[in-house]
Image (tube, rainbow, N blue to C red):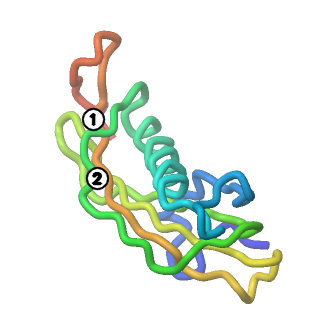
Amino acid sequence: MSLCPPDGSPEEQHLTVRVLAMPANTNPSGDIFGGWLMSQVDIAGSILAVQIAQGRVATVAVHNFQFIRPVMVGDLVSCYAQMEARGNTSARIKVDVYSERERDPETVALVARASITYVAVDQQSRPRPLPES
């Protein structure tokens, strides 16, 4: 089993969240609730943002969130994060989400994609400069 994204470079994309979609995460139709997936994506992006900021960050903008395919109960959801842009106090992170059904690598598919900006913050929640890379 590879921890590299099916269509990305392991040097650029980082596996930051891997979770099993459970029945408690479903909407009334029995599909995985979009809000649950958005939460996983925000966590995945923030993990890379914290590494870049070397400390606390705050989510300040979701520029894009695209649901490409449904996620089903029992799917193994993997989120890969990559820095898209870097500012003085912020980092824009792209997150690609893949789903694997029934632990079959042949079923891996891109199910969502997002772009989120995180700002490095100090102990008083004020923006602070990102450390030099």
Residue toward you, 19 or 37: 37
Q: Locate residue 78, reporting x and y percent.
A: 62, 63
Q: Secondary structure at mark 1?
A: strand
Point 79% across, 73% down: residue: 1
Q: Which residue is mark 1?
A: 119
Asked if 111 appears above or below 3 in the picture, the reply is: below
Residue toward you, 28 or 51: 28
Q: Is residue 47 left or right of residue 49?
A: right
Q: Locate residue 27, reporting x and y percent.
A: 58, 61
Q: Earlier in the sequence, mark 2 or mark 1?
A: 2
Query: Label 1 neighbourhood size at 10 Å, few (<14), some (14-19), many (20+)?
Result: many
Residue toward you, 99 or 14: 99
* Residue found at the far bottom of this picture: 106
Query: Which amino acid type is shown beneath numbered disc 2?
Result: Val
Query: Label 2 neighbourhood size at 10 Å, few (<14), some (14-19), many (20+)?
Result: some
Tell me the quarter of the picture where residue 123 sits.
Answer: top left
Tell me the quarter of the picture where residue 14 sits.
Answer: bottom right
Residue toward you, 111 or 95: 111
Query: Which amino acid type is shown beneath numbered disc 1?
Result: Val
Q: Which residue is mark 2?
A: 62
Measured Cα–Cα span from mark 2 to mark 1: 12 Å
Point 56% across, 67% down: residue: 10
